[in-house]
């Protein structure tokens, strides 16, 4: 086992399978990339660099600085890494006041006294309300506050606790409490969020005596400093965002995700062909959990976030995220809902806990493991363990999987969709896989944004699950995506982007590290975001497909059965450039437009969707944002301006009043005209010069739909299987 330069531990060794056979150990579960099945790996490939140093060299574009460095005449002097970090730290500190630090000491005694199975206690709230004892500050270490978690063995050395809004930060410097004397408010930073860090001295809670209240301080500054000091590859960009690297993994690892299969989940969850749920047993989960907790306990500090999921106050979930990186803490601060000081005071025991020890690998020889990466979900314990990947999206999507389990049990539909609302209160849901335009079309400057990715549909309407956005950055420009462009500022996390070495300007077209570059920012950074992120029942359900075969119409009105069929199918097509080795269009299907995250059978979610649409009078639409006049390579992509006109016509209701005719094979209802869109492109056969080629391609795609849907035909829904038969009849007929 060896440590690399980024704090990761790599395990070397080959022949895991052979070793298992020789020792008579049960074989590990293996998975493969079978494109004819439903659940595919939607993650980005691993990073192109072979070593950590090579990865860091890709992050910064080399060039001569355009401003001479002080004291150097004629030539430009190169800054050392240490000097560069000092300059970055100076750029985010107020220069005309006291430098504020939080000193952390290693408390080896707390590690030595670790006992497993004890449930420690969270220290929260104003210390003045907890103790009237004067603090003892003569000790040379700070005893660690302990974190309350169900059946937890955690007893960390130092905890940087929560980024939720609060009004005070308690600081220790040189073993003495900072007093008000000589301290100035730090007002040069973003004042929107502050926090409390509770540092304990000699096991006694600090009281108000001698404390300096810095109400304008934002702990995101502290996280910036922690990242720049201790996480190689962390830099401040020219717009103030924190640029970070996620290590060897630059996307999710769905083949390394495991779910504990027990008596309950064995009956409730979707298992087998096409399912994203790969089983593990309770014992193996506990082995990995202990490995993660031991790693976290070995660190001199950890980061703990207490936050919420779901803007609907009646159905929100309390989550706790324990992580080792400031980058991960800031990411989850952005992505989850941030509690108020009063909500934090009453937070109590979380409903779900993540232990993110992603810098440390799992043991590849453990049963059910197939690599050094493992993302393990235990629904009975309501815990998630991450080992062997530092990609922050695993936390976000892991919690989304939890919501896909918990919400349907409350008769609430969880959805992988964008959502916006017009000024008259009309809500639209947008479903679509990568490259279909879901984020672009749901982020409409003329409508309020409820959310861009994850939602719940309850008895009262829709609500966003998250508190932030996770936008793709590849080829981002101010002209195409002004809202996302402007959201990349202080507090935003930029993952795996490349920037100019001296100006720190990001090159969003550069794919040197990965194509899957991302930006994580609070939803409040979008000017037209609706806060709180809730809305009435949707009027339109829009299914987006990027059809690179060029045979689906730009827009079709769907009946209820067709909506369920295409919702379960979750179709789009990969084209060259979206995945290595793809040279011609390739159909891909992801059940419910998010197969990697759903927990129950897709027909469960489809039946709930149909029920809610019928009850509240919502209309289903299939919108093709892909090709017209031929397949990829011969035809051309449908203009975004035309697609926007179609979406506008759906929002305003004019498309409901249009005349329609039915297509062959798929039986789709297509309008004869849409304002602002050439009528000849509305029926795709009109745009093909080679009619025989059109028919052949149409039949090919129809066959792919049929083959894909065979996975779901054995699951009966509705009285006497009536609904299943209706859904099957809504598919291609040939």
Image (spheres, rainbow, N blue to C red):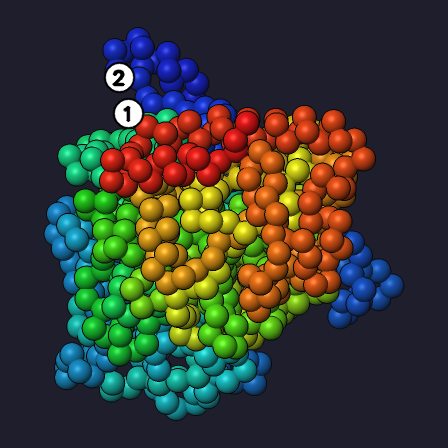
Q: Nearer the viewer, residue 193 or 683?
A: 683
Q: Nearer the viewer, residue 704 or 614?
A: 614
Dividing the picture into quarters, in which one does residue 370 lie? Answer: top left
Looking at the image, which residue is at 79% across and 67% down?
Answer: 67
| Inter-mark Cα distance, 2 to 1 | 7 Å
Direction top: furthest residue: 22
Looking at the image, which residue is at 46% across and 38% down?
Answer: 730
Question: What residue would you read off at disc 2?
Answer: 26
Dividing the picture into quarters, in which one does residue 695 lie? Answer: top right
- Horizontal side of residue 480 vs 204, given as left or right: right
Q: SS class of the residue under badge 2?
A: loop
Q: SS class of the residue under badge 1?
A: loop
Looking at the image, which residue is at 37% across and 89% down?
Answer: 180
Q: Earlier in the sequence, mark 2 or mark 1?
A: 2
Residue 353 can be seen, yes or no: no
> Which quadrant of the rendered structure holds the C terminus?
top right
- Horizontal side of residue 101 vs 20, given as left or right: right
Q: Nearer the viewer, residue 220 or 675?
A: 675
Direction right: furthest residue: 74
Q: Residue 207, image x and y in percent?
A: 22, 82
Can you say whether 34 is above or below 49 in the image? above
Can you say whether 577 is above or below 407 in the image? above
Dividing the picture into quarters, in which one does residue 63 lie? Answer: bottom right
> Which quadrant of the rendered structure holds the N terminus?
top left
Q: Residue 610, image x and y in percent?
A: 37, 51
Looking at the image, which residue is at 40% across and 38% down?
Answer: 727
Question: What residue would you read off at disc 1?
Answer: 367
Q: Nearer the viewer, residue 731 or 147?
A: 731
Tag shown at residue 127: none
- Horizontal side of residue 81 vs 375, given as left or right: right
């Amino acid at each position: 086992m060896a440590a690399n330069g980024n704090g990761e531990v790599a395990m070397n060794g080959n022949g895991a399978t052979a070793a298992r056979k020789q020792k008579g150990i049960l074989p590990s579960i293996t998975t493969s990339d079978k494109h004819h099945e439903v659940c595919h790996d939607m993650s980005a490939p691993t990073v192109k660099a072979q070593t950590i140093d090579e990865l860091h060299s890709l992050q910064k574009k080399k060039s001569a600085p355009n401003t001479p460095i002080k004291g150097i005449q004629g030539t430009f002097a190169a800054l050392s890494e240490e000097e560069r970090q000092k300059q970055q730290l100076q750029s985010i500190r107020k220069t005309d006041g006291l430098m504020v630090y939080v000193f952390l000491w290693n408390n080896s005694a707390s590690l030595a006294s670790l006992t497993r199975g004890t449930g420690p206690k969270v220290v929260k709230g104003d210390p003045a309300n907890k103790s009237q004892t004067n603090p003892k500050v003569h000790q040379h270490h700070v005893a660690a506050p302990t974190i309350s978690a169900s059946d937890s063995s955690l007893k960390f050395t130092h905890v940087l606790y929560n980024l939720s809004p609060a009004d005070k930060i308690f600081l220790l410097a040189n073993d003495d409490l900072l007093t008000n004397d000589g301290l100035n408010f730090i007002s040069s930073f973003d004042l929107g969020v502050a926090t409390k860090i509770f540092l304990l001295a000699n096991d006694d809670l600090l009281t108000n005596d001698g404390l300096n209240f810095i109400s304008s301080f934002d702990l995101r500054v502290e996280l910036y400093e922690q990242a720049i000091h201790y996480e190689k590859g962390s830099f401040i960009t020219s717009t103030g965002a924190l640029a970070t690297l996620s290590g060897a993994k630059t996307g999710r690892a769905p083949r390394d995700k495991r779910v504990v299969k027990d008596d309950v989940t064995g009956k409730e969850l979707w298992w087998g062909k096409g399912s994203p749920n790969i089983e593990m047993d309770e014992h193996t989960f506990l082995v990995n959990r202990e490995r993660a907790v031991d790693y976290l306990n070995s660190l001199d500090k950890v980061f703990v976030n207490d936050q919420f999921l779901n803007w609907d106050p009646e159905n929100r979930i309390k989550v706790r995220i324990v992580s080792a990186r400031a980058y991960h803490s800031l990411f989850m601060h952005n992505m989850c809902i941030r509690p108020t000081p009063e909500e934090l005071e009453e937070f109590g025991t979380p409903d779900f806990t993540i232990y993110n020890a992603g810098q440390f690998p799992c043991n590849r020889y453990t049963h059910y493991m197939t690599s050094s990466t493992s993302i393990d979900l235990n629904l009975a314990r309501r815990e998630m363990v991450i080992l062997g990947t530092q990609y922050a999206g695993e936390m976000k999507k892991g919690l989304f999987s939890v919501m896909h389990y918990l919400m349907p049990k409350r008769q609430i539909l969880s959805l992988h969709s964008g959502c916006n609302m017009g000024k008259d209160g009309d809500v639209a849901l947008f479903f679509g896989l990568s490259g279909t335009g879901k984020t672009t079309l749901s982020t409409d400057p003329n409508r309020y944004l409820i959310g861009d990715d994850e939602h719940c549909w309850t008895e009262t309407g829709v609500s966003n699950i998250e508190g932030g956005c996770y936008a793709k950055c590849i080829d981002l420009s101010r002209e195409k995506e002004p809202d996302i462009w402007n959201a990349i500022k202080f507090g935003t996390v930029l993952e795996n982007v490349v920037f100019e070495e001296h100006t720190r300007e990001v090159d969003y077209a550069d794919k040197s590290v990965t194509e899957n570059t991302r930006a994580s920012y609070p939803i409040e950074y979008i000017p037209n975001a609706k806060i709180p992120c809730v809305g009435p029942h949707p009027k339109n359900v829009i299914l987006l497909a990027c059809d690179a075969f060029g045979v689906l119409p730009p827009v079709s009105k769907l009946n209820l059965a067709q909506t369920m069929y295409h919702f379960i199918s979750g179709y789009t097509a990969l084209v060259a450039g979206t995945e290595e080795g793809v040279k011609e269009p390739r159909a891909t299907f992801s059940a419910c437009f998010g197969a990697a995250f759903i927990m129950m059978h897709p027909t469960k979610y489809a039946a709930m969707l149909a029920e809610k649409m019928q009850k509240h009078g919502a209309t289903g639409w299939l919108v093709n944002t892909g090709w017209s006049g031929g397949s990829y390579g011969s035809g051309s992509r449908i203009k975004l301006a035309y697609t926007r006109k179609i979406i506008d016509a759906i929002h305003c209701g004019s498309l409901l009043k249009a005349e329609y005719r039915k297509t062959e094979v798929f039986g789709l209802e297509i309008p004869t005209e849409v304002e602002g869109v050439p009528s000849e492109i509305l029926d795709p056969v009109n745009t093909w010069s080679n009619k025989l080629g059109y028919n052949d391609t149409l039949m090919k795609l129809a066959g792919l739909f049929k083959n894909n849907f065979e996975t779901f035909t054995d699951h009966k829904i509705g009285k006497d299987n009536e609904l299943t038969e209706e859904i099957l009849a809504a598919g291609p007929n040939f």
